[in-house]
Image: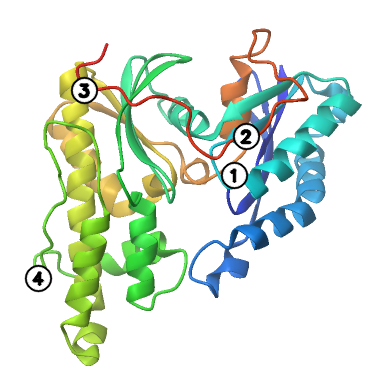
Amino acid sequence: MRILGIETSCDETAAAVVADGTQILSSVVASQVDVHHRYGGVVPELASRMHLEAIVPVVQQALSEASLKPEMLDAVAATQGPGLVGALLVGFSFAKAFAYAHRLPLLAMDHLEGHLYSALLSDPPSVFPFVALLASGGHTGIYYLKARGDYQLLGQTRDDAAGEAYDKVAKMLGLGYPGGAVIDRLAQQGDPQKIVFTRPYLDKERFDFSFSGIKTAVQRYIASNPETWVAAHRADIAAGFQAAVVDVLVHKLLHAAKIKRCRHVAVVGGVAANQGLRDRLAEAAAHKKLCLHIPPMALCGDNAVMIASAAHHYLGDPKSTSLQDDVYSRHRRTVCEPDGS
């Protein structure tokens, strides 16, 4: 069963063909980093325009690399939300037209669900039930996954997402956009003990996050020190910031595993590519005798493989989408309390 996946929720135009849910036949991602870099963040209107330019050649390339013609596909899957509405409309509308023209089933997929199930594409793949940390530029949450299609959001960020905080701190330090990778690299050159920021745990027994405070703490630290000092100690600032964020993410994930009595834990989303987080989680999971699952680097950021892979398990059920369906900007799931079943 070969599914064409399309993902345009933010600033990557992505298309992929996946067979039987796990066999990646092609994966194409057109990044807009160079376009948005000068603005220090994603400009929604520009993102939409870039998607319009890229969607046709990206899909054509994905089909070409998979050596398939449209009539050889079994379904089309596209991200319906959450994300930037203008960006989502490009990919979702294209998928509707493509499915209609080629008489293929259309599957509308949740962007976050795609990220969660990318844990099943890790090596080794995760095993149900498991808890997952989903951390990206727009979302941060802890999820409990009982089985396919059966998952709970245990807690989420109340303000900035982890990746968003990375981008903002990188901008403060003059490091440009996107900030996650550059801060991660810079932090490895610094001393995380030299400049210590308070850990924003909120309530250690619950699973909500708040990264607005740590962002403000870094801003105040920079403002209260001479520019020459800040320039000379950027690596230490980055290391201190990253240590604070990573400590919170790791604590919440491992606490969720304890509460839900799960042996398997996963981290997914763009922040899952952060080497500092990966190393810290590997160490902590080994200490707790937990099995850690992280997708390959190429599947951590926004991609269409995760959309096509997740869609495979909805073939033939009411998940099939009407051409009248629309995109949505916010996640539709309800937050469950930690003791929710």
Q: Which mark is residue 194?
A: 4
Name which residue lies at 36% across and 14% down.
128
Question: Does 160 sit left or right of 84 as displayed?
Answer: left
Q: Amino acid at mark 4?
A: Lys
Q: Using the numbered discs, state the Cα–Cα distance from disc 2 to disc 3 in whole angstroms.
A: 28 Å
Q: Secondary structure at mark 4?
A: loop
Q: Earlier in the sequence, mark 2 or mark 1?
A: 1
Farthest top residue in view: 317
Q: Amino acid at mark 1?
A: Ser
Q: Using the numbered discs, state the Cα–Cα distance from disc 1 to disc 3 in whole angstroms.
A: 29 Å
Q: Which mark is residue 79?
A: 2
Quarter of the image with the N terminus in it: top right
Residue 23 visible from this viewpoint? no
Q: Amino acid at mark 3?
A: Pro
Q: Earlier in the sequence, mark 4 or mark 1?
A: 1
Q: Earlier in the sequence, mark 3 or mark 4?
A: 4
